[in-house]
């Protein structure tokens, strides 16, 4: 099979192979064993010091569950995220060696997804609009006071008022211009954030976590974007130990952004006025109103001193199960977040419809199979309506096929 490898920069190709290998959670030795070569050969290929052969490229693409098209892109790879995370991984690995590889794999997946997004935008000549604020200076403020200030300022800047946020992910994608993905990460990792000038702000959420947990993680990572844009972050579940002020701020910001104090207290007062002192079952309903977990809502009430400190811990000690209570109350569980932003999916389908990419390339972008791409494309053609400017009416388009669960 002729791939024209001589016309491709071996350094750029080597970097793409390295990112694909890490995303597949494979070591250099495992890749070498697959090819039947020495590990030093893989090292040389990834450094661009040795040109890969067509048969080797095809074999590695298959092993990495990547497409040859992805590895042989015309545009140079966008560096940055993987480089930025290296020092972070080294520091984190020293404290917790078992999670270092998972972090590296997560960064590789985020880099790959964001780069795919940018490539689709370039093909469609449709860059993601950015509405980035100047970084907030929170120096000298206590974490909780800084969180109050920044959350209130962002709600005003984005015109969100005090109401509960309907869909935080869509808001931050459309109103701010962040690239947000829901990826399968190690269970201990809630999310990660990175930024480069070319890719912009990029956030990965853990698809294994419930939607309300992902929403809190998203708000957490957004806090880092707002205050320390050039410093990557990985949110790792902590059992114990001192929480750094930067993390205390991000956690407090997430609670305040999703549950503004005025709205929480006003809503609870109205409930008490109409129904009397709230019972535990009422708190279950109220937490769903804010689209947060029962724990997050109750701890926010404790923080506002509306209910006694330690209420949630007491309920937990008494073996109260919020999920079972939600079922008894008839509260429907939210669907998991899709792997890719809706805009990303639509760009891929429109590029396919215009003949800018092939069906196989669309399947690679959407991490799915060709049959699912055909289903999505057929739905898109049936439902997409043109605006006055002749552009597809994407906002009204609905997907019946969940590409996030049809991964290769």
Image (cartoon, helix red, strand yellow):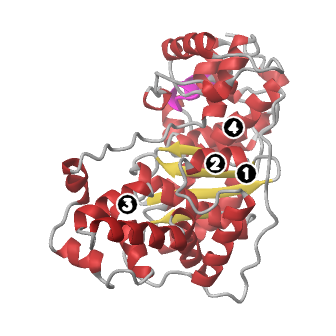
Q: Is residue 96 visible?
A: no
How many angstroms separate mark 1 from mark 4 (CA)? 29 Å
How many angstroms separate mark 3 from mark 1 (CA)? 26 Å
Residue assigned mark 4: 16
Numbered circles on residues, count: 4
Q: Are marks 2 and 3 in contact (CB under 8 Å)?
A: no
Residue assigned mark 1: 176
Residue assigned mark 3: 287
Q: Residue at x 61, y 77 (%)?
A: 148
Q: Are marks 4 and 2 in contact (CB under 8 Å)?
A: no
Q: Residues within 10 Å of mark 4 (few under 14, many from 20)?
A: many
59 drawn magenta:
yes
How many angstroms separate mark 2 from mark 3 (CA)? 20 Å
First along the sequence among labels 1 and 2: 2
Q: Are marks 3 and 1 in contact (CB under 8 Å)?
A: no
> x, y percentage for residue 343?
66, 33
Residue at the front extreme of this rendering: 274
Q: Residue at x 67, y 26 (%)?
A: 394
**Local SS, label 3:** helix
How many angstroms separate mark 1 from mark 2 (CA)? 7 Å
Circle nearer the viewer, 2 or 3: 3
**Local SS, label 2:** helix
Q: Are marks 1 and 2 in contact (CB under 8 Å)?
A: yes
Magenta-highlighted residues: 56-66
Residue 112 image label: none
Circle nearer the viewer, 1 or 4: 1
**Local SS, label 4:** helix
Residue 171 image label: 2
* Image-based side of 199 in relation to 260, left or right: right
Q: Residue at x 30, y 83 (%)?
A: 310
How many angstroms separate mark 3 from mark 4 (CA)? 44 Å
In the rendered image, the vertical position of residue 57 relative to residue 44, given as above or below: above
């Amino acid at each position: 099979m002729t791939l024209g490898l001589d016309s491709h920069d071996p350094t750029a190709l080597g970097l793409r192979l390295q990112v694909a290998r890490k995303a597949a959670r494979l070591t250099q030795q495992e890749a070498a064993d697959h090819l039947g070569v020495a590990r030093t050969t893989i090292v040389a290929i990834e450094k661009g010091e040795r040109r890969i052969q067509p048969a080797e490229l095809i074999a590695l693409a298959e092993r990495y569950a990547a497409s040859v098209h992805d590895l042989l892109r015309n545009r140079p790879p966008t560096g940055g995220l993987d480089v930025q995370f290296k020092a972070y991984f080294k520091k984190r690995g020293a404290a917790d060696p078992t999670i270092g590889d998972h972090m590296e794999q997560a960064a590789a997946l985020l880099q790959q997804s964001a780069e795919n997004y940018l490539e689709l935008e370039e093909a469609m000549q449709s860059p993601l609009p950015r509405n980035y604020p100047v970084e907030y200076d929170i120096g000298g403020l206590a974490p909780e006071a800084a969180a109050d200030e920044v959350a209130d300022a962002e709600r005003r800047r984005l015109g969100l008022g005090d109401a509960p946020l309907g869909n935080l992910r869509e808001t931050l994608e459309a109103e701010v211009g962040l690239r947000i993905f829901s990826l399968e990460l190690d269970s201990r990792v809630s999310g990660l954030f990175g930024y480069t000038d070319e890719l912009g702000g990029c956030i990965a959420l853990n698809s294994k976590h419930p939607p309300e947990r992902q929403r809190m993680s998203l708000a957490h990572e957004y806090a880092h974007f707002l205050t320390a844009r050039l410093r990557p972050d990985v949110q790792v579940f902590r059992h114990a130990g001192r929480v750094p002020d930067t993390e205390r701020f991000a956690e407090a910001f997430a609670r305040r952004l999703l549950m503004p104090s005025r709205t929480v207290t006003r809503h609870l007062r109205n409930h008490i006025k109409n129904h009397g002192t709230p019972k535990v079952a009422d708190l279950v309903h109220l937490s769903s109103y804010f689209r947060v977990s029962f724990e997050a809502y109750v701890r926010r009430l404790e923080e506002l001193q509306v209910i006694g400190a330690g209420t949630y811990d007491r309920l937990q000690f008494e073996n109260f199960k919020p999920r079972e209570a939600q079922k008894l109350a008839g509260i429907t569980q939210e669907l998991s977040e899709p792997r890719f932003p809706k805009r990303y999916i639509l760009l891929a389908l429109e590029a396919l419809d215009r003949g800018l990419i092939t069906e196989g390339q669309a399947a690679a972008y959407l991490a799915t199979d060709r049959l699912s791409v055909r289903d999505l494309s057929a739905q898109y053609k049936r439902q997409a309506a043109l605006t006055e400017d002749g552009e597809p009416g994407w906002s009204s388009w609905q997907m019946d096929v969940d590409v996030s669960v049809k991964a290769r």
